[in-house]
Image (cartoon, rainbow, N blue to C red):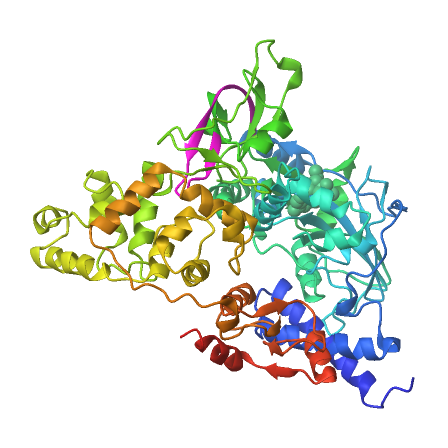
Amino acid sequence: MTIPANIPARARELREQLNYHNYRYYVLDDPEIPDAEYDRLFRELQALEEQYPALVTPDSPTQRVGAEPLKAFGEVKHVVPMLSLGNAFSGEEVRDFGRRIAEKLGLAEDEIDFTTEPKMDGLAISLLYEAGVLVRGATRGDGVTGEDVTQNVRTIPCVPLRLRAEAQRPLPRVLEVRGEVYMPKAGFEALNERQRAAGEKPFANPRNAAAGSLRQLDPKVTASRPLAMFCYGVGQVEDGQLPDRHSAILAQLKDWGLRVCPEIRTVRGIDACLDYYRDIGERRASLPYEIDGVVYKVDRIDQQEMLGFVSRAPRWAIAHKFPAQEALTRLLAIDIQVGRTGAITPVARLEPVEVGGVTVTNATLHNQDEIARMDLRVGDTVVVYRAGDVIPKVGSVVLLRRPPDAKPFVMPTHCPVCGSDIIRLEGQVIARCSGGLYCPAQRKEAIKHFASRRAMDIEGLGEKLVEQLVDRDLVHDPADLYALTVEQLAGLERMAQKSAENLISALEKSKATSLGRFLFALGIREVGETTAQSLAQHFGDLQPIEEADLETLQSVPDVGPIVANSIYTFFRQAHNLEVIDKLIAAGIHWPKVEVKAAEVLPLAGKVIVLTGSLQSMSRSEAKKRLQALGAKVTGSVSKKTDWVIAGEAAGSKLKKAQELGVEVLDETGLLNLLQQQG
Ligand code: IVH
């Protein structure tokens, strides 16, 4: 295929721009353009490369994930061995380190410059660049031989596939950069949430997660994991000059486009090193990544060379570790906590133990499956750990120390707070109390939801007020709101006579509502506004909904088995029915809904495909709302499709629609369709 003359230049230009913006974003932490604009440039390059595959270069930003899964990792011999560091666990040991160095250099301690760096809690990595292009990534292994993880490091977004040639200093022909691959705390938490939701084992800590993610034979798996990297040194360098101080080398790496930790400082003398340790120790919990100590390195390279090495570690550097964040203790009991949404969380009661300077007596166990996976039993000795400042967790069980009478955990069948059934819907990890409005643990949230604008819209009934009302036992369930008097309200904190009167009239006003709002206000799990509307529309009144069986419920558009089960269980709890009766007795009413047969719904029989991203709502929200109007929303475009709704950055589906001559609507068109809700 012949490539039009201007195309290769455009592809090159796009690549340069994307590399530049990556550098601004990841290395300088100072993006110049919004993400959406970056995505646009990226897609333009992708489209060009798709059309003219000859244009693809291995260092193109589009080529991060591509390789097929490996059978095994190859071996890599490190030309310059990857060493480890000596450790210091106290200020005294750090002072000894300072004295040894000063003596060897024949200097006073306060004449020596150090770089002070966070000790990243991840895994060491070597990146090899030839003529500025990333040609290999390798793990440390035993320091001499590591594993070839090139395909995987390429997927890490902040690792440049090509270094910046426009930097101040020319690039060496061969440059091996060393650093730490790690998983940011937020990414780690999100990954573990995903693991739990998929019923898979969560990772014990970000270091394990980073190591496990990098050592995947399928680079697509690595690409799906939130990995990042900081560079902290160099290995092999050929045909090129580096500055004569470690701090200047790091600055140079940054200029070449490599990411360096912004917390690194250069200080003079050991006292200043210890100040750095204290300062970063205090800020440790608020850093976005885990560190397990700090590293001090003699800054001048000539001094490093004079000091040399002892066995496998340099004499010119030392790791000053933070106290351990893990400890062993005994599991005394497993209690149940009921969260604000009824979620049942098992909590470990522990024999008090010091972990990283804090006494720990409780730890979350997340859910039943996790207890089963660990085979955790009351009486067991367990490893407790704290990751940063987050809630302590039970990491694992020491099976060798299991006493013969250790007891397995049995999930209760009834809520310990209100006695309602505990239910766990099929396919869900979390068990919940079905008490809803009745369960005191859920009451405050339920009442806030009930009063909220899109539910009963009770003006003036804010969060603080709800808390006071529940705490003072004035309100047990939403129906009690309607029995409140001006006198009772005026006696509350920050409540004047006038506001009390206003609230009473707002309550009065809220009694005239609609069935959809009322259903939504009840706070039935899985029943959002749209589902509540669909139910109202389908059944017309409350009683048939209360009486509907699972099958009937599932015949409502947008109600699947999970939602149906949740509705069904809600109306089988006697307390919920009592509260509803009380609400109706208090005067809540709604006009009867005229039930429209499916064919009469405004979009009945219409087939719609959603693509691209919408500004005013999520795609799933749009889907629900279209379905509530009777439309069928499908995933692929065919001749049967009536409309394709194309949001921003719509891709192949939009193209297909144009090819087939299917009518395409933009977001305004979608909003117009939804207006028909009436
Ligand atoms: S320098 C010869 N700097 O700690 C010096 N290492 O026990 C080699 N690490 O395997 C390492 N943060 O993975 C250095 N700022 C930092 C570091 C760091 C974390 C890790 C590294 C190494 C281990 C040494």
Q: Residue furthest right?
A: 1
Horizontal side, residue 444 vs residue 287: left or right: left
* Residue 251 figure quarter: bottom right
Query: Ligand 1 shows up in which quadrant of the image?
Result: top right
Magenta-colored segment: predominant secondary structure = strand
* Near-viewer residue (20 or 96): 20
Horizontal side, residue 539 vs residue 112: left or right: left
Horizontal side, residue 55 vs residue 85: left or right: right
Residue drawn at 33 percent across, 42 percent down: 577
Total numbered labels placed on residues in the image: 0
Considering only vertical position in the picture, is 530 above or below 348? below
Q: Is residue 82 visible?
A: yes
Residue drawn at 44 percent across, 57 percent down: 528
Residue drawn at 72 percent across, 78 percent down: 639
Magenta-colored stretch includes residue 330 = yes
Q: Position of residue 126 (x, y in %)?
A: 78, 50
Horizontal side, residue 339 vs residue 103: left or right: left
Q: Is residue 468 visible?
A: no
Considering only vertical position in the picture, is 588 above or below 440? below
Query: What is the quadrant of the C terminus in the image?
Result: bottom left
Considering only vertical position in the picture, is 492 above or below 47? above
* Near-viewer residue (622 or 539): 539
Magenta-colored stretch includes residue 255 = no
* Near-viewer residue (608 or 392): 608
Q: Position of residue 309 (x, y in %)?
A: 77, 38
Highlighted range, magenta: 326-346
Q: Position of residue 162 (x, y in %)?
A: 78, 67
Query: What is the quadrant of the N terminus in the image?
Result: bottom right
Q: Position of residue 294 (x, y in %)?
A: 59, 42
Considering only vertical position in the picture, is 195 above or below 678? above
